[in-house]
Every structure is written in C-alpha cells, then in structure tokens.
Amino acid sequence: MRISTKLILSFAVIISVLCIEIVLNQIISDNAADTYQKLKNQALPALRILDKFESVNNEFYLLTSNKVYNSNLPLDSQNRLNGILEVEFPYLKTELFHLSENLDKQDEITLKSPEILKLTNELIDLGNQINNLLIIKDNYSDSAKMKVAISLVEEDISAAHANLNTNILILKINYGNLLEDYQNEFAQNLKSLSNIILITGVLGILFGILVAFLVIRSISKPIRALNSAALRVSSGDYDTDIILSGEDELASLGESFNTMTSSLKSNFELIKINNKEIKQQENRIRKVIEASPSAIILMDSEKKISLINAQTEKIFGYARHELIGVSAEKLIPSRLLKMESKVDDIFSSKNKIDTLGIDKNFYGITKDNEEFPVEIRLSFIEIHGQDMILASVVDITERKQQEEDIKKYVDQLKSKNKELEQFSYITSHDLQEPLRTVLSFIDIIQEDYKEKLDDDLNTYLKYISEASTRMSSLIKSLLDYSRIGLKAKVETVDCNTILNSVTADLKYKIDKSRAEINYLALPTIGGFNLELRLLFQNLITNAIKFQKKTEIPKIDISFEENRTHWQFSVADNGIGIKEEFQNKIFIIFQRLHNREEYDGTGIGLSHCQKIVELHGGEIWVESDAGVGSVFHFTISKNI
Amino acid sequence: MLLKKKLIIILLSFISIITGCNNTEVKEINIGYIAPMSTRATDLGIAPSKAMQLAIGEYNSSKTKDQPKINFFIEDDKWEKSLALPAYEKLRKEHNIDVVFISNTDGTVELQDKILEDGVIAVNPLNNDKLLSSLNKNTFKIAKSTEEAHKALGIRIIELGLKKVIILHYPNNFMSVGGNAIKNILTENGVENEVIKTEKDQIDFTEILKKAKEKKADAYVFLGYKNFGFAMKQARDLEIKASFFGSTTLLDPDFFSNSEGAIVGTECTFFTPLDGNYILASDFLQDYKKKFGEEPFSIWPPMQAYDAMNIVINEIKKVNEDKTKEQSQVDWLRNRLLNVKYYQGVCGNISIKEDGSSRGIYFSLYKVESDGKLLKIKR
C-alpha cells in the first residue's frame, strides 16, 4: 500500500474519532446551554425578584410598625416608606407579573403570583391608610386614630405581611431546589463533556501513536537502506544498487536512486574525460606561456606574483620560486614605482589595458640590481572570480641600441644632405658669376668688334653665347632645385586655388595649344604652398608640352583620399613614355628628346620628385607610348 | 438606446428604495432645554443644563454605532412663561428638536398645544404637581412632588406649634401650588394662615410685613426667589422675630446676599445626596465637578435634571432596535417612558406613572445654617 494511502486512511480514522467527539460534545453542550438558559431566564430572575420582594416586604413592615409606634419618625423613614408604596411594590408587582407570563402555567410562580399580587395591593392600601392617619405628631395623641393604626399594623398588615412572606418563602424554597437541580444538571453536563473529551482524547492519542509507529516503521527501514546506499555512492561506489520491496513511494524512490547512481556513474566518466582534456589544454597553454618570447607575470590585486614563465626567470635572473608570492614591485627600480598607480587604475576600471615603456623609457631590474629597458603591457583579467593583472614584459635592450644607431645614421645623413644642399647652392650661385662675365664679354665682342669678326667667328661666338645661356639656365634650375623647401612653412593649401592660379598663369600656352584641363573639386590639404603650385605647374606644363601634334591636349586632374595621405593623378593624352624610360624621367637633367624637338632643361620632374618627397610622398608614372601618361603623386596628411 | 435608459432608471429607483429603507434608522436625536439661564432663578437653569450636558456627553461617548447621537440645545426663558413659547419655536425651527426639557411650570403649560401639534415630548425635570399631571399625554414630570415637598413644610410648622402663619409666594404656578399645599395642611389642622401673592419684581415688602406683625404672625413662609431675601431682611429690621420658612429655592446665592444674613435659621424642604442613592449621587457630583470645575450651589435641580435626562436617554438609545416602522417616534418614546417602573437614579428609585408624573424623589427638611450650607432637621 502506498504511504500516502496509509496516511490518508490513518488521518481519516483520527478525523472520524474527532467528528464523533464533536457530535457528542455538541449534544451535551446543547443540553448544558439549555440548562444554563433555564438558570438564567427562570430560576435566577425568579429568585432575584423573590429575594427583593421578601426584603421590601420586611422593610415595609418595619417602617409601618415604626411609624405607628414612633411619633418622631424621621422624615427619611417616611420618605422610604413612601418609596416602597409608590415605587418598589408597584415595580415588584410588574416584574412578577411579567415573569409569570413567561413561565409555564403550572409553574409555582404562575400559580402563586395572583395571591402575591393581591397581598401586595393589600399592603399598599394598608400602608397608605397608615400614612393618611398619622400625618402630624398630634395624630399620635388621637386615641381613635392610634387604635385604628395599631389595629392596621398588628392585625391587617401583620397578617398580610406574614402571608406574603410565607408565599415568597415557599416559592424561594421551590426555586432554590430548582436552581440546585439546574446547577447539578449543568455540572453533570460539564462533567460528561469533560469525560468525552478525555476518553476520545486518550483514544485519539493511542491511535495516533499506533499509526505513527506503523507508518514510521514502514518508512524508516527503506530510508535506512537508502541512507546506506547513499553513503556507499558518496564514497565512490557507483555500482551500488538497492532493492526495496513493495509498491509504495519509497520503492519508487529506490528505483530512482538506482537510476541516479547509474546516471552519476556515466556523468563521472564524462567528467573524467573532460578533466583530462582540460589538463591537456592547460598544458598547452602553459607551454605557450613558457615559450612566449615576452616575460609573462600574473599578479593579484595586491600585486603579488602568482605565475611567471621561463622568460621572466631569464631576463630578471630570478628562479621561479623566488618570485611566486612576492610583490611584482621587486622587479621595478624603486625610483619608477609609479607603476603602482597604473596597476591600481586597471584594477579599478577592470577592463583597461595599459602600457609602460612605450611612450617613455621604463626599466626592469634584475636580481643583480642591473637595470634594463623594458616594454610592459598590462591587461586586466578575471580568473575564478578573482581580479588579476597579466603583465607581458619585453626586454628591449637590443632594440634600443638599434634605435640609437639608426638615429645616429639619420643625423649623419641629414648633416650630409645639408652640406650637399649648401654645396649645390653655393656652387650654383658662384657659377653664375663667371657665366655672366663670359656672356658680357661675348656681347661686348659682338658689339665692339662686329665689323672685325668674320662669319665663322660670329657663328662660334653665337654657339658660345647659346651654350653659356643654356649653362646659366641649367645653373638657375639647379639653384631652384636646391632652394626647394628651404624656407617654406607648412600651411593649409586649397588645391582648387592653386589650380586656378596655375591655369591663369599658363593661359597663353593653354590657349595656344587649345588644351582642355578638367578637374573636379580638389581638397584642402596641409603643405608648402609655393612648392605645391610648382608641382602642379610642372606636371600640367609637361602634359601640354609633350603633346601629339595631331591631337588637342586633354588633361584630367583627380584625387583620392586615403587614411594617411592624399593621392593625386594628372593624366594626359600625350606622346607617352616608353617603359624602358619610365624610371629615368625623374633623374635630374635627364632628357628623352632633343632640345630642338622639345625645349627645357630636364629638371622639371626632378623638381616634382623633390617637392613630393618634401611632403612625405611618392611620385610615379604609368604610361603607354603614343597613348598618354598618368602621373601619380601622394601627399602625406602628417607632414 | 431608450430601453437602456429605462433599465438604468429602474435600477436607480431600486437602489434609492433600498437606500431609503436603510435611512429609517435614527442617526440623531435633538433635545432642547428651556430654562432660566439669566435674570432670575438661574440655579434652576444653569446647573441643570450642565447636568444634562454631562448625561448626554457620557452617553455620546459610550454609545454603540447603532445608537443615535444626541444633540443638546439650550434657550433662555428668563423664568418668564411668556418667553417659553418663543424659545420653543426657536428650538424647533433651528434644531427641529424631538424632546424639550423645560423647568418652568407655567412655561410647560404654555407649550402644551404646540408639543402635541409637533409630536414633541416635553419633560419638566424640576416640578411635578397635580396641574402638570393633568396636561396632555406628551408631558412628563420627572421630579419631586411640589405638593408633597411643601406639605412637609406645613407639617413642620404644625409640629412646631406655630399658630399664625403668613405665606408669601411669588406669582407663578409652582409657588402658588406650594403655598396652597401648605395652606391646606395648616387649615386642616386648625392653624391660622394667610396666603399673600406678591408682585413679580417686588423688592419692598415692608407694608405686607408690618401688617403681618400687627397680626402677630409667628411664622413667615417665603415661597419665591432671591427678592424674598429683601423681605427677610426687612422683616428682621421690623424686629419680627418669628420663624422663617422657605421653598426649595433658598440656596440661590443672591437670596442670601439680599437677606444680608437674615435667611440664617430659615427652614425649608430640600434634597441632598443623603436623600437619594448616596453612592450614585456622590459619583454624579464628582463627575460634575470634574467636568465643570465646581459643584452646583443648589444640588437638587441638577440631580433631578440628570436623572430626568438619563431616563429619556435610557429609552432613546433603544430606538433603532425597538421601534417598529409603523410606530411614530413620539408614540414610541411616550410608551417607553410610561413603562419606566424602576429607574435607579441619583435621586432615588424612580417610576413613571400613567399620567406622566414620577414617583420616588422625596425631599427632606433642612435649615439654612450659613451661606450655601444647610443642616438636616431631626424631628
């Protein structure tokens, strides 16, 4: 039988016992209540009225006797007598009348009340007679009045009083007995009630104990078996099985227990496999950490080191056991312990990554108190709910050394370039002077010895003059080349303004060649204004100059914006450049055509290259001979 | 749409009928009191009004939610019967009173027609004489018997062996009834007596007293109010050495001051806690003092008023449990009061008779010993 069925049956029996008790209690309580009502509504009111009647009757008799035999009756006594006659007796009559109306017709009071009322009326009448006879003291001297008064008291009042008292006494005795009967009955009811409660209570308790014993026994045995099996399972014996007989909930629980142990067993096996995989994973991670070229240091919120790798041991010169549990501040020179604030910042923000030694030199300190430059990357991580910081430390001693060497070479190079530029400038400038002298003397010779010179000599002089002029032009170009960027300042340059200005300056050439120059809105960029103007001018001039005789020149200027730089393109439909010459066009004074075909010094594109490099950019050309060329150049956004 | 409106109207009517049924419950009862609050006989007005307030206050503070609240309103009639009706009309108009208490006997007579017309119960808490008992069914007298109180004074005069008695009385019903009660007992017992009605505002009684002295009167009965204090003084000034007797009104402080002490030794009928239910009476006086800061100078008017009000309250509080819908409130209250057969009040055990008069309050004989102090007379 199922435990719940057993319990329900047990409780049903107990509830039945309680119901029987309640019914019996109710019956006896009703009897008791009935008796109590009789006590309350019949016996007690009747006795109260009878007591009061008796008391007032006696008081009346005393007062009337006193009035008759005492001429000096106090007015208080007279007032009291009046009160009895006018209030008390009438009130008692009314009360008795109402009581008798509510009682059974055969009740003693109902039977005797007419007699009592009659006697009371008689007493009231006699009392009034006495009052009317004896008003003042003189009345007491009147023997006739006194005789009547004494007669009234001693005979009539006395008799009526005694009669009334007898009737009341009989009723009081009867009602006293009735009261006692009611009280006994009431007490008996209460006793029966108490007995029933006691008996049913004892029976209920005994039955309850029996039920509890049986139920506990039927439950405790399988529970003990379950407990024993559970202990075996807890000690790792997952092959434990229990067999509980019966079909109750505990038997079902036993089956569930067996299922649970089986499930536990398979789960534990799964956990073992998982643990093995986790361990392998850990080993892999550990090896990665150990193999890291950076020193890895894991520290807690108090900066105590909990993990390091081999590289840490190597660069700081400590053995692993010397650092674990020690403050990471031990690895920093004491003068640089500002790191503390960064570490604290990371702990407070919880997701911050910060660095040390990137913007500013930072140093580690070895076990031998030797400082060395380091770069440290600090990362916040949470491991098993604990806030940690992972520091990745790189020894940058070699890199620092290389940086210093590079810096030194750059400085040397800059110095050489400066010297070269100076040399070029001075040379160009100083070369102009003798050339101007040569040209001056050629002019003088041609002017002053015009008639003495033959044709050949004139021709030679003309060659010398032209060569000198060309040399002067070359020197000027070289001077200009050396001056590029010399005194320029970076400013904001609107490329549209520059193009407008260049096309205005080249208006004659453009009109003459009927060239079409197309460009959309160009950007405003940071750069050297005059140099950029020269750059565009040279490229447009070249595009017009190196044009096919049969076609109208078409020049398209465009740009692209990139993250770090602007890229401009100047495309033409000119004669183009053969592939083999494309890498020579930016060499200074390099010419691909003779001067008769296309004039110029051959320094224009060198200027362009120098201007572009001055702007941190590059210049190159894409060209097909006979089709056209596209010159690309870039301008850095951070000059 | 029309059907909906009709349904709503029917529903609202039903609700109003249901609500109307509930409204039959009496929530408040208004009681008025017409009394001399100024000018004359104020000891019969002020202290009783306070005693009634005390009774109502006690009831209102302890009543259950089903019992009606009682409101109390006072109007001053200056002890003038002509002012009784206007005071009553005012109370009805302004407060729609259900019960009116009135001290003045003449005033009570004045209200007879109106209370019957209006369905108002009238209660005189100070006087209870045969004239009042002959009035209409709505009038109750919860007080001492005027005739009995004065008869006791007449008996006292007879027992003192006084032979020639001058009875002066104020021109109102109460004093007139009292004077006649004395006259009757004296005449029945052969004592020569003369009843003289004085003027309402008279203060010079010399001529009357001179004539009485000439007639060698050996007892002077002053049934009236404070102006008789002057009469007592004038009598002693005329070297009249006869005994003085008075009504229940002697303890007015002005009476003593007007007499300039001549009132001392005057015998009168009076009522003190000793004459009633002593314990209840003492409790009442304590409560009175606690609420109003002083005990009343003349004790019996507030004691009677307290009992009268409590008898009415004792019935009114049952209105919502006892009165049927068919009964009018005035009929119900009249029947309830007529069935009071035993009320244990501060003045004694009181019953109300079929004619609306009460029994159970009995006055005793006292003598004025000093201002405000009386001494009980032993026979």
Image: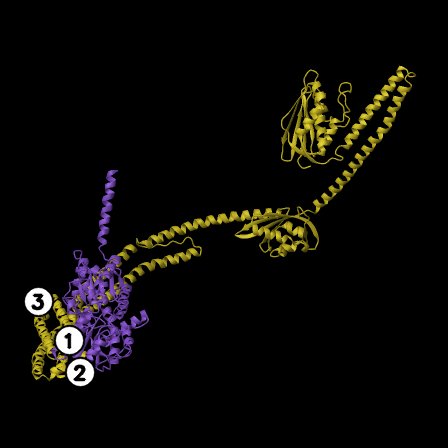
Chain colours: A yellow, B purple
The image quadrant of residue A458 is top right
Q: Is residue A335 visible?
A: yes
Task: Report x, y in % for residue A630.
Answer: 67, 25
Front position among marks 2 and 1: 1
For the residues labelled 3 and 1, say whether their Cβ atoms are less than 8 Å apart: no
Q: Chain of mark 2?
A: B
Query: Whole-Å distance between the Cαs marked 3 and 2?
Result: 56 Å
For the residues labelled 2 and 1, say whether their Cβ atoms are less than 8 Å apart: no
Query: Whole-Å distance between the Cαs marked 2 and 1?
Result: 16 Å
Q: What is the number of the mark on residue B160?
A: 2
Give A101 or A28, whichever is nearer the viewer. Answer: A101
Q: Mark 3: which amino acid?
A: Lys
Q: Mark 2: which amino acid?
A: Leu
Q: Mark 3 falls on what kind of element?
A: loop
Give A141 or B238, whichever is nearer the viewer. Answer: B238
Q: Mark 1 falls on what kind of element?
A: helix
Task: Report x, y in % for residue A298.
Answer: 59, 51
**Residue hosting label 3:** A105
For the residues labelled 3 and 2, say whether their Cβ atoms are less than 8 Å apart: no
